[in-house]
Image (cartoon, grey):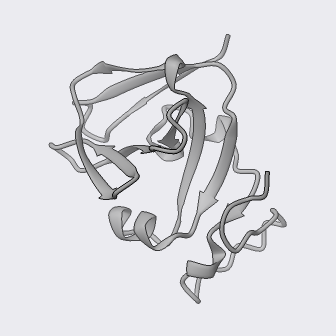
Amino acid sequence: MKEIEGGCFCGAVRYRARGKPRNTMVCHCTSCRRITGSPVVAWITVAREEFRFTRGKPAEFRSSPPVRRTFCAKCGTPLTYEHDDSPETIDLTTCSQDAPAAFPPTHHSWLEDNVGWVRFGDGLPEFAQFRPG
């Protein structure tokens, strides 16, 4: 079974997940942009039961009523995203992983919120909001 390991920039918080990601994507939504200070954020989705923090405890907050996000309180690295409507999964910031190239994105979501000067040209499918299905 594939192990995914990662953590924050300063090393205070580390995590591990097992199994194959259920989803990989690049998000262009306003909340992800504002929380990271970046024009886009890459995510992978894994089974919640296969995920755990292995070092430290991240800080957390609700960025909207159904969404809980975690980050390192020492260095600020965004780590996870959980939605109340999907309690069986957790999203991990792709670039907080030790090997982010292992899980390239399959699509772009929330292009309706895209910053006008961001253009990828990578040929991946693009969706105004969520990917259907």
Residue 4: give x, y in percent of width and height: 55, 24
User: Seen from this angle, which residue lies furthest top?
Assistant: 1
Q: Quadrant of residue 71?
A: top left
Report the residue at 65% width, 16% height from top: 2
Q: Position of residue 115 (x, y in %)?
A: 54, 83
Q: Nearer the viewer, residue 103 or 67?
A: 67
- Quarter of the image where the N terminus is located: top right
Q: Residue 53 in the image: state x and y as whole percent.
A: 34, 22
**Residue 122 point in image, percent of width and height:** 78, 66
The image shows residue 69, relative to residue 63, as above or below, that is above
Q: Relative to 86, is 106 above or below? A: below
Q: Which residue appears at 52% of the width and 70% of the height?
A: 29
* Closest to the observer, 81 or 96: 81
Identify which residue is drawn at 35% across, 47% down. 68
- Horizontal side, residue 28 vs residue 126: left or right: left
Quarter occupied by residue 123: bottom right
Frontmost residue, 14 versus 91: 91
Left of 106 or right of it: where is 89? left
Q: How many marks?
A: 0
| Quadrant hosting residue 120 | bottom right
Above or below 51: residue 86 = below
